[in-house]
Amino acid sequence: MTVHDRVIAVVGASGGLGAPISRLLLERGAHVVAAARDQPRLDAAGLGCPTVSLDLRDARAGDALLSVVLDRFGRLDGVINAAGIVAFGALADTDDLAIEELFLTNAIGPLWLLRRCLPHLVASQGFFVNISAVVAEQPMAGMVVYSASKAALTAADGALARELRRSGVRVLDARPPHTETGLAARPIAGTAPRIPPGLAPDQVASVIVDALDADEWVTQLPSTAFSS
């Protein structure tokens, strides 16, 4: 497996982690399609590759992605889902809409996306990467719903890695520690507590892309895989 000459869609490509992943893939010779909810922010990232606006909360997001990818390149070799949202605060103080939004974006949306892309990934013997979070391993008080949504994503990835093995589709669950993506400054609810400085996004991006370029495929990158 190598990313060179592969057609790879990066979802959440306007974000603090999706953008450096996209740039690194391009540097290594991949054909990238960058997708995000906020088209102006995606344009401002200046990635220099085809883009598509989509919302993971919409079950048809995968259809929008495939329309652009297949029209431009005729195939899909991999998807990296770097999209996600966060909320802070006790469960009692988190309203119903925020709970729903977290699960739609962080857990349900990625499953809808993979379901749409799966026939094309089977055809190319491709891969699907979900960027979960360290809270899937170490759930945190004051981040109950976010922790639960990421744990659900990680559980799904573990099952999918087994379910899709025979079809040749590789599933990777990446769980980086806190990373300086700016996400904590944009919660959909609550206010971030004091958080020690996180990892550099470029460092995290490099670990993930290196795993795709490695001779031996891995199905998970636990938080410890990102230590320097």
Image (spheres, helix red, strand yellow):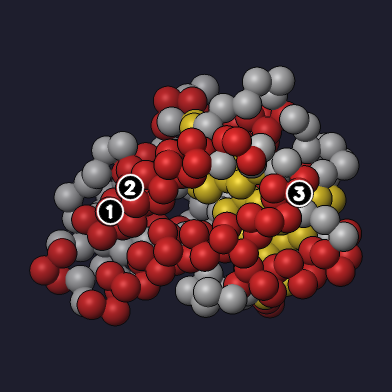
Q: Which residue occupies 69% across, 48% down? A: 122
How far separated are the C-alphas under marks 3 and 1?
33 Å
Residue 183 horizontal/vertical position (percent): 45, 58
Residue identified by numbered label 1: 148
The total of numbered circles placed on residues is 3
Mark 1 secondary-structure assignment: helix
How far separated are the C-alphas under marks 3 and 2?
29 Å
Q: Is residue 79 left or right of residue 102?
A: right
Residue identified by numbered label 3: 123
Task: Please report whichever mark, 3 or 2, sits nearer to the chain's N-terminal start.
Answer: 3
Name the residue nearer the viewer: 57 or 187.
57
Dots 1, 2 in contact, CB < 8 A: yes
Q: Let me know if residue 3 appears in the view.
A: yes
Residue 73 horizontal/vertical position (percent): 88, 59
Circle nearer the viewer, 3 or 2: 3
Dots 3, 2 in contact, CB < 8 A: no
Q: Which residue occupies 20% across, 71% down? A: 94
Q: Is residue 90 left or right of residue 109?
A: left
Residue type at mark 3 is Ala
Residue 158 horizontal/vertical position (percent): 43, 39
> Residue placed farthest to the left in the image?
92
Mark 2 secondary-structure assignment: helix
Residue type at mark 1 is Ala
Circle nearer the viewer, 3 or 1: 3
Q: Is residue 60 above or below residue 124?
A: below
Q: Which mark is residue 130?
A: none
Q: Quadrant of the N terminus?
A: top right
Q: Which residue occupies 51% across, 52% down? A: 181
Task: Please report whichever mark, 3 or 1, sits nearer to the chain's N-terminal start.
Answer: 3
For label 2, the crowd category at 10 Å Cα-Cα, with few meaning under 14, some 14 to 19 and many 20 or more, is many
Residue type at mark 2 is Ala
Residue identified by numbered label 2: 151
